[in-house]
Each structure stands twice: as structure tokens, then as C-alpha cells.
């Protein structure tokens, strides 16, 4: 019995320390902010090609009923963006790939790193550290509704936030995995 209590206390202590370590150390990246004009240009290209993207992503209005938080038209990683979204599009839309090439968008192989919603909200994932129970993401968000792109909800927490420009925000959010 004493062994189980000791093991539990050590496990709990280790969990608290790991949580504190992973919560700290994430700072706003000034290099990312210095490239805000490139994100703005990419947002303009995405919005200008909104109908093409809807068609490429095969989005239908009834798809938004499946979305819990917002009506996502596209949540694309580099592979999906290059091979589905911009495959048959103009060079301007393909120019967004350069953001991944230059390390301004996190190059995740599985999850989407550019999100475009029906409300013209654009979220760029600039960095993401995935842990066992949570992950910390850094985002450049264009949100004309000033709702932070829906981040910081459902038990997730915003660790840092910096207003950049009209409707533009830099957010560091800690997401908790629900197992």
C-alpha cells in the first residue's frame, strides 16, 4: 500500500513538473511577426480564390453542419494544399507554398496548418510542439469577427496573445488532448 502511494506521488509530481516545463518556454516569435506582410498577402490570395478552394476541397454547405466550432472550408497541410487545393489553380495560389518552404508555416505531415473558414477566418500554424497529453501551437490569425479564430475554447488555454494589426493576432495556445 505504501509503495502504491509513493509511486502515485512520484507520478503526480512528474506530471506537474512536465506540465510546467511544457507550458513555459514558448515565446512569441518576432521573426514570424516581421513576416506579417507575407501572411497578409497569402490571406488575400486565399480569399480571392475562395470559390476555387471551396470547389477543390469539395466543400458543400451541409458540410458545415458537421463542424462543431466553425465551418471549415479547408484545413490543409502542405501536401493537401499542393496536391488538392492548388493543383489545378493559378500560380498566385501556388505561391502560398513558399510559406512552408521558408518555414513560416509549420510543415506537419498529418494535420492541417492553414485553415480557411466560411466566415473568411484564416489561421496559419507557424509552430507546434506535440506532447503526450497536450500540445502548444503558435498561430497567426486573421479573424474579421475578432473571435481569435475560435482558439482558447473547449478547455484549451491561450498562453500568449499579441494584437498585430486590424483583425490580425498572434496566439500561442495550449491544446489538451481528450482521450
Image (tube, rainbow, N blue to C red):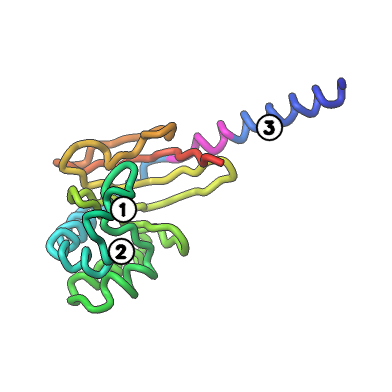
At numbered mark 3, what does the secondary structure look like: helix, strand or loop? helix
N-terminal of the pair, mark 3 or mark 1, is 3
Q: Is residue 43 left or right of residue 20?
A: left
Task: Check contact, mark 3 vs mark 2: CB within 8 A.
Answer: no
Q: Is residue 72 left or right of residue 3?
A: left
Task: Work out which quarter of the rendered image holds the C terminus and state it.
Answer: top right
Q: Is residue 130 left or right of residue 151?
A: right
- Asked whether 3 or 137 is in front, the reply is 3
The location of residue 36, given as percent across then percent down, is 23, 52
Asked whether 21 falls inside the magenta stretch, the response is: yes
Which residue is denoted by mark 1 in the rendering? 124
N-terminal of the pair, mark 3 or mark 2, is 3
In the rendering, which numbered label is found on residue 14? 3
The location of residue 106, given as percent across then percent down, is 40, 58
Asked whether 42 falls inside the magenta stretch, the response is: no
Tell me how far mark 3 sits from mark 1, CA to CA. Answer: 33 Å
Q: Nearer the viewer, mark 1 or mark 2?
A: 1
In the rendering, which numbered label is found on residue 68? none
Q: Which residues are magenta?
A: 19-26
Relative to 177, say whether 157 is above or below: above
Q: Is residue 29 visible?
A: yes
At x 75%, y 28%, the residue is: 10
At numbered mark 2, what does the secondary structure look like: helix, strand or loop? helix
Amino acid at each position: 500500500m505504501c509503495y502504491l502511494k509513493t509511486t502515485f506521488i512520484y507520478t503526480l509530481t512528474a506530471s506537474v513538473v512536465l506540465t510546467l516545463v511544457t507550458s513555459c518556454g514558448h515565446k512569441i516569435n518576432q521573426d514570424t511577426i516581421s513576416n506579417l506582410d507575407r501572411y497578409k498577402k497569402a490571406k488575400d490570395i486565399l480569399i480571392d480564390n475562395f470559390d476555387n478552394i471551396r470547389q477543390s476541397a469539395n466543400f458543400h454547405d451541409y458540410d458545415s453542419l458537421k463542424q462543431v466550432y466553425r465551418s471549415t472550408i479547408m484545413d490543409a497541410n502542405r501536401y493537401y494544399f499542393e496536391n488538392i487545393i492548388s493543383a489545378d489553380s493559378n500560380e498566385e495560389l501556388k505561391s502560398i507554398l513558399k510559406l512552408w518552404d521558408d518555414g513560416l508555416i509549420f510543415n506537419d505531415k498529418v494535420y492541417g496548418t492553414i485553415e480557411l473558414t466560411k466566415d473568411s477566418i484564416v489561421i496559419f500554424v507557424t509552430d507546434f510542439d506535440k506532447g503526450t497529453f497536450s500540445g502548444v501551437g503558435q498561430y497567426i490569425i486573421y479573424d474579421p469577427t475578432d473571435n481569435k479564430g475560435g482558439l482558447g475554447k473547449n478547455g484549451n488555454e491561450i498562453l500568449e496573445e499579441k494584437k498585430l494589426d486590424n483583425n490580425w493576432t498572434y496566439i500561442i495556445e495550449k491544446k489538451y488532448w481528450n482521450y
